[in-house]
Image (cartoon, helix red, strand yellow):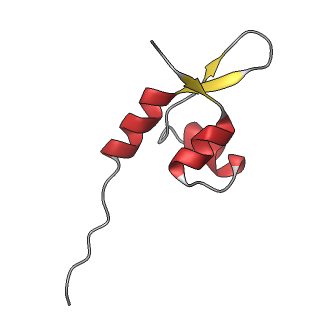
Amino acid sequence: MVKLITAQQVLELTGYRSRTTLWRKVRAKVFPAPVKLPGDAIRWREQEVQDWMEDAPRQTYTQS
């Protein structure tokens, strides 16, 4: 079953602070696009967001 989540839930999961940042990343095609539901509802597939987070490169720290 596909679970759909709101923009607010996406912000909470990703740590992004604003919807503007979220939409910039969607438009740049570096973040999963949402789905449009009947009416004005926009939701993200939770699994796609989780997969994106898993695939994101990890920060590495090297000793200098």
Q: Position of residue 27 (x, y in %)?
A: 59, 38
Residue at the far right in the pictured view = 39
In the image shown, does 34 or 3 lie closer to the viewer? 3
Q: In this view, does 3 lie to the left or right of 60?
A: right
Q: Where is residue 57 in the image (x, y as percent from the top left)?
A: 31, 54
Image quadrant where residue 43 sits: top right
In the image shown, does 24 or 18 lie closer to the viewer? 18
Question: What residue sits 54% from the left and 42% below the top?
Answer: 28
Image quadrant where residue 17 sits: bottom right
Q: In this view, does 24 lie to the left or right of 40?
A: left
Q: In which quarter of the image is the C terminus?
A: bottom left
Image quadrant where residue 42 sits: top right
Q: Quadrant of the N terminus?
A: top left
Question: What residue sits 47% from the left and 42% below the top?
Answer: 30
Q: In this view, does 28 lie to the left or right of 21?
A: left
Q: How many labels does the image show?
A: 0
Question: What residue sits 57% from the left and 23% below the top?
Answer: 4
Q: Where is residue 5 in the image (x, y as percent from the top left)?
A: 60, 29
Q: Where is residue 62 in the image (x, y as percent from the top left)?
A: 21, 80
In the image shown, does 41 or 2 lie closer to the viewer? 2
- Up the image or down, 59 lies above or below 9; here it is below
Question: What residue sits 50% from the left and 37% below the top?
Answer: 29
Residue at the far bottom in the pictured view = 64
Residue at the far left in the pictured view = 63
